[in-house]
Image (cartoon, rainbow, N blue to C red):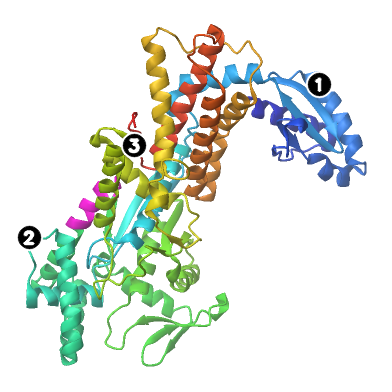
Amino acid sequence: MDVKEKIIKALEDIIKEYVGEEISIKLEKPPNTELGDYSVNICFKLAKLLKKSPKMIAEDIVKKLKEKNIEGIKEIKAINGYINFYIDSNAFAKYLTEKICEEKSNYGRGHKKSVKIILEHTSANPNGPLHIGHLRNAIIGDCLKRILEFYGYDVETHYYVNDMGRQMALVVYGIELFGLDKNKKKDHAIAETYIKVNKYLEENPEEEEKILELMRKYEDALEKNEDNEITKKFEFAVNYALDGIKETLNNLKIKHDTFVWESSYVRNGLVKEVIKKLMETGKIIKEETYMLDLSDFGIEKKMVLARANGTSLYSTRDIAYHLDKLSKCDIGIDVLGADHKLTAEMVKAALKLLGSKVPEIIFYEFISLPEGSMSTRRGRFISADELLEEAIKRAKEECNKRGVEEEIAYDIGLGAVRYNIARISPEKPMIFKWEEALDFEKVGCPFIQYAHARCCSILKEAENKGIENEAIFNYELTKEEKELIKKLDEFKDIIRESAENRKVHILANYLLELAKIFNRFYANCPILLEKVNDDVKKSRLKIVKSTKIVLEIGLGLLGINCPGRM
């Protein structure tokens, strides 16, 4: 049990005596160190229950807390109704650094929760390569998976493959007309054909009927659970694109556990069953198409369940997918672009009508390059492949400037891309800027990787000199040491907050702050100089080792390698 847990346990026991029940306690950081390391404002809540002033209650609780002699606490004060705790910095530094170095890669790991999460992310249409927009979805989803698993959840990731509808029919038709360039990466070849067929249809609009016929024939074969020439053409086109997409995801260190094809829900009859059950709700309006009235859920726009020609729509198949997915997990999470908000709300409303639980949804705003917006249909997009290639190229240039081996350019380039996307809250639109992504000095991932490399260098030098890292801490700690120790202690809370709130940027920003605090410690606290006392050297090396471990774990949870030298 660490110091914070001991404080909370002692407070909970005392407060239970007061009110006869447990009350949740949350420790806060005081605005300045003169007011202690932690504080609680629970006395203001108790004042209403006990009809006493917060000041009196705080003073009384502090007396009882002092009787408990909480290990690691130097002083406890009641200040204007707040209870402030001052930790024994030396004892705490010794305890924490020993704990981190003993637990190593498990430091901050949560207990197994026996809760199954299915997390769907990326799910880009297989009509071309992943572009920078898809990248934000994929990186948020992959980082979240890593964090949730580390926190103790059982997580399965899904890529929902949109193999039906007009876009895939266009690709199939385009392959028949133009073929595929076998010299190109597969997903890029599919995109080239998709662009060509869109241009062709603009010039020959009468051919549109052939696209609709392809869609009808594909869905008809699926409903009959047949495998014929049409289904084989669709499967070939989708798999061809997915081969290229999976290669890109692999280069980005992203892996999905399951690829779920939307057509499977037409094949197994679940789409028809969904439509039938929704019909039975009495909320269906039949006009030219079948529409679902969702006004009871505050949604004025009606949801179209099927086209006039009888083919199902993406949203109907999405309901079927969610019914299946949510039946196999405790929590379902979808990562979706903000432009899907209305459709997602409609799907959730339909699921409620069917008596199903609903998914949690993480919406993210658009990401762009300073050059402007993108369109797959017109061929104006920056692929994830190009972005990563450019990042590695620029990282190599930085390595050459700094006299570092080029071999680490992949770790730096990929880290720059992943971190720069992960660090921004998903609800904020963002422009991907190279000068920020590859910033070694202030905000980029290389800055954090460099702090880690500095830790490695210090520890290696100490090892060569035969100096051990040992948690002694028998001297007056500097403010920089205290600040760094407290930051390392926050890591467990950051993991919990990132996991419970489904916010990967919380961890990303913590790591940047930790690297900055470590640099201040490095600049102001000599470690291996001859004039430094041996006990101080050993203690500071223990802090360095602890920082190295936390940076490694944190960056690993963002899918980023630490080169160890820069």
Return the residue at label 1. Answer: 66
Question: For the N terminus, which image quadrant?
Answer: top right
- Distance between the alpha carbons at the discs numbered 2 and 1: 75 Å
Per the image, label 1 sits on a secondary structure element best described as helix
Q: What residue type is labelled 3?
A: Asn
Viewer-nearest residue: 325 or 235: 235
Q: Do the residues labelled 2 and 1 touch (CB within 8 Å)?
A: no
| In the image, residue 191 above or below residue 438 | below
Question: For the C terminus, which image quadrant?
Answer: top left
Return the residue at label 2. Answer: 183
- Distance between the alpha carbons at the discs numbered 3 and 2: 32 Å
How packed mark 2 is, by other alpha carbons closer than 10 Å (few <14, some 14-19, many 20 or more), is few
Which of the labelled discs sits on residue 103, or is there none? Answer: none
Regarding residue 382, the answer to whether it shows in the image is yes
Please state which of the two labelled residues, at mark 2 or mark 1, is closer to the viewer: 2
Q: Which amino acid does label 1 sit on?
A: Lys
Residue 117 image position (x, y, % from top left): 42, 49
- Distance between the alpha carbons at the discs numbered 3 and 1: 46 Å
Residue 34 image position (x, y, % from top left): 76, 31
Q: Give the residues in magenta.
A: 243-257
Which residue is found at the position 71% from the left and 38% from the top? 25
Q: Which amino acid does label 2 sit on?
A: Asn
Return the residue at label 3. Answer: 561
State which tag comes first along the sequence, 3 or 2. Answer: 2
How packed mark 1 is, by other alpha carbons closer than 10 Å (few <14, some 14-19, many 20 or more), is some
| In the image, residue 280 above or below residue 391 | below
Q: In which quarter of the image is residue 564?
A: top left
